[in-house]
């Protein structure tokens, strides 16, 4: 089997040698002839082209369609760029709801992630590595599914009307899964000699962690939390689409009713909210660093 | 002057007031956020439903998981990968000129402020709004997904590209200048080698994200595994849903694995 694959590989190389000129032979001053190896980028390019053509066929990729129907978007764009400002009384409370969901979800997720990250860091818990490893696998499994899927499933648990709560829980799960990963990856890189010194005096691991490691990682912890808050604000606009509260609920409605002026107003306010929150979090993160 | 412990203690900055202020602000924010949550009660049948969903992970629909019909994981998963792949390439190509125009060391100030604003504007558009807009051009189907992915990828990719472009080491181009290289040679041997690794690793990272975003695209009918998955959850077809979820998990984990290897080699 292995031989066959090797044979196939060499025959492919021979095939390329025939159709594509080989790199020039170099004759050194002392007469030795050097055959420079062909760079791998050629094979990679050919593979990429084949993949792109194949995938274009699957996705019915057709540039002509874009040019033919491009004018269709102007009507949509012109409406969305002329926001209906009278709609703000409906939009503002929903934007605040989105911010609330993202804030609370991020907070709870961040609070949960610190102890878990502490327990699964390979350099702190040396005795129960298999446990840490299995929690890590579980976390990466949680991370594979988008927030939307969680929202859709959790929504089944509640009587209709608890949208924001469902949204908050989904944001919590998402924040917990990514923040724990970023945190334990950070903890695993830091120098633990202070922690070990304190631990050798006979205090518990948790106490040693609080005195020796926590002050070290706290700025990073805060700045990672703020970073995930940024992400969550942007992601939670989508949650309403499945009914989990926030701005997505009215965004979906306006898009379905083709009230693009109103959708434009929603996007405008979301734009302002995201910009100001990003600026604020950037400012705080710079102060922390 | 000799410092005693007491003096040191007195000289320490007074942080108590500041901490109290921060603490009270955060508590106020928490109370404000909790007050907005309406809890209407648990849905009793909902628990059974979720239990059934969890149980269905142990017997997913084998027809969907291993079959080759148009609603199987194989076909839809390949479509999802194709959408994410082509979308990432589209975004990666479109992001290059914008990144150069938005970089502070290349373009004049008013130009890069304009393009920085454009990037932020692009990042604000939620993926499904872009999807709704794109569908007007292409109609329903995976092609809409590709264009949506391409457009939404631009924001983050440009941001990371700009960092790479602003980090270009000018000494290299100066050295090439000294040897008498022309402009194209300077770009080919001085600038491109400095950027390829970072650009590639950004693109691969974005590809990972786009695979996960594919589930969102299903909402607006832009192809991929997300549409059938959410439909299956909504219509109590849990054996189908768990088959899709398992398929999605395998795809995401496999791509994450390879992307980590490739990005590790690039850096």
Image: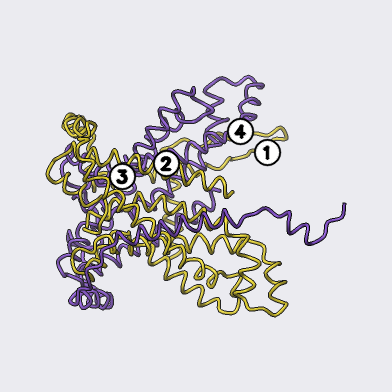
Chain colours: A yellow, B purple
At x 31%, y 62%, the residue is B248
Circle nearer the N terminus (3, 2): 3
Residue B134 visible in the current orientation:
no
Name the residue tied to disc 1.
Answer: A32
Say whether marks 3 and 1 touch (CB < 8 Å).
no
Name the residue tied to disc 4.
Answer: B169
Q: Residues within 10 Å of mark 3 (few under 14, many from 20)?
A: many
Looking at this view, name the residue that lies furthest to the left.
A257
Circle nearer the N terminus (3, 4): 3
Q: Are marks 1 and 2 on the same chain?
A: no
Name the residue tied to disc 3.
Answer: B149
How much space separates mark 1 and mark 2, taking CA atoms?
47 Å
Report the disc number at residue B157: 2
Pointer 1 chain:
A
Q: Are marks 3 and 1 on the same chain?
A: no
At x 43%, y 54%, the residue is A228
Image quarter in which the N terminus of chain A is found: bottom left
Badge nearest the viewer, 4 or 1? 4
Q: Residues within 10 Å of mark 1 (few under 14, many from 20)?
A: few
Pointer 4 chain:
B
Q: Is residue A210 above or below residue A87?
A: below
Q: Residue A17 vs residue B123: left or right?
A: right
How far from the left and from the top, in percent, is residue B242? 25, 70
Residue B221 visible in the current orientation:
yes
Say whether marks 1 and 2 touch (CB < 8 Å).
no
């Amino acid at each position: 089997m292995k031989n066959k694959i090797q044979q196939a590989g060499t025959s492919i190389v021979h095939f390329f040698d025939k159709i594509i000129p080989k790199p020039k032979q170099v004759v050194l001053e002392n007469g030795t002839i050097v055959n420079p190896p062909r760079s791998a980028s050629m094979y990679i390019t050919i593979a990429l082209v084949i993949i792109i053509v194949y995938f274009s066929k699957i996705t019915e990729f057709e540039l002509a369609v874009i040019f033919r129907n491009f004018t269709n978007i102007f009507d949509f764009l012109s409406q969305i760029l002329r926001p209906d400002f009278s709609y703000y009384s409906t939009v503002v409370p929903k934007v605040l709801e989105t911010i609330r969901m993202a804030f609370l979800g991020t907070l709870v997720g961040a609070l949960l992630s610190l102890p878990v990250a502490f327990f699964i860091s390979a350099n702190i818990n040396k005795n129960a590595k298999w446990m840490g490893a299995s929690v890590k696998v579980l976390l990466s499994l949680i991370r594979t599914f988008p927030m939307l899927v969680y929202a859709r499933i959790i929504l089944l648990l509640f009587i209709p009307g608890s949208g924001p709560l469902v949204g908050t829980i989904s944001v919590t799960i998402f924040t917990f899964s990514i923040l724990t990963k970023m945190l334990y990856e950070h903890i695993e890189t830091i120098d633990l000699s202070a922690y070990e010194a304190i631990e050798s005096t006979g205090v518990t691991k948790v106490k040693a962690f609080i005195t020796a490691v926590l002050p070290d990682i706290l700025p990073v912890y805060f700045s990672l939390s703020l970073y995930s808050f940024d992400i969550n604000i942007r992601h939670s606009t989508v949650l309403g689409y499945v009914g989990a509260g926030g701005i997505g609920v009215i965004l979906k409605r306006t898009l379905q009713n083709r009230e693009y002026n109103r959708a434009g107003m929603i996007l405008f306010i979301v734009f302002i909210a995201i910009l100001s929150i990003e600026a604020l979090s950037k400012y705080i993160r710079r102060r922390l660093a | 002057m000799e410092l005693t412990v007491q003096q040191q203690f007195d000289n320490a900055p007074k942080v108590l007031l500041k901490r109290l202020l921060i603490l009270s602000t955060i508590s106020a924010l928490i109370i404000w956020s909790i007050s907005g949550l309406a809890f209407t009660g648990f849905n009793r049948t909902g628990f059974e439903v979720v239990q059934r969903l969890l149980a269905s992970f142990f017997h997913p629909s084998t027809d969907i998981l291993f079959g080759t019909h148009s609603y199987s994981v194989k076909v839809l998963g390949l479509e999802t990968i194709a959408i994410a792949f082509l979308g990432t390439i589209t975004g990666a190509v479109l992001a290059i000129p914008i990144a150069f125009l938005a970089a502070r060391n290349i373009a004049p100030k008013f130009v890069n402020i304009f393009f920085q604003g454009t990037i932020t504007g692009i990042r604000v558009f939620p993926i499904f709004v872009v999807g709704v807009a794109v569908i007007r051009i292409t109609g329903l189907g995976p092609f809409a997904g590709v264009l949506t992915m391409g457009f939404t990828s631009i924001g983050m990719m440009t941001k990371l590209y700009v960092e790479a472009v602003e980090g270009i080491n000018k000494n290299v181009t100066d050295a090439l200048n000294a040897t008498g290289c022309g402009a194209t040679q300077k770009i080919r041997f001085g600038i491109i080698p400095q950027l390829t690794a970072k650009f590639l690793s950004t693109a691969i990272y974005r590809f990972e994200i786009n695979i996960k975003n594919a589930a969102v695209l299903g909402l607006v009918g832009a192809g991929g595994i997300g549409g059938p998955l959410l439909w299956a959850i909504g219509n109590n077809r849990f054996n189908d849903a768990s088959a899709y979820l398992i398929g999605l998990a395998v795809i995401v984990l496999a791509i994450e694995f390879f992307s980590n290897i490739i990005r590790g080699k690039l850096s």
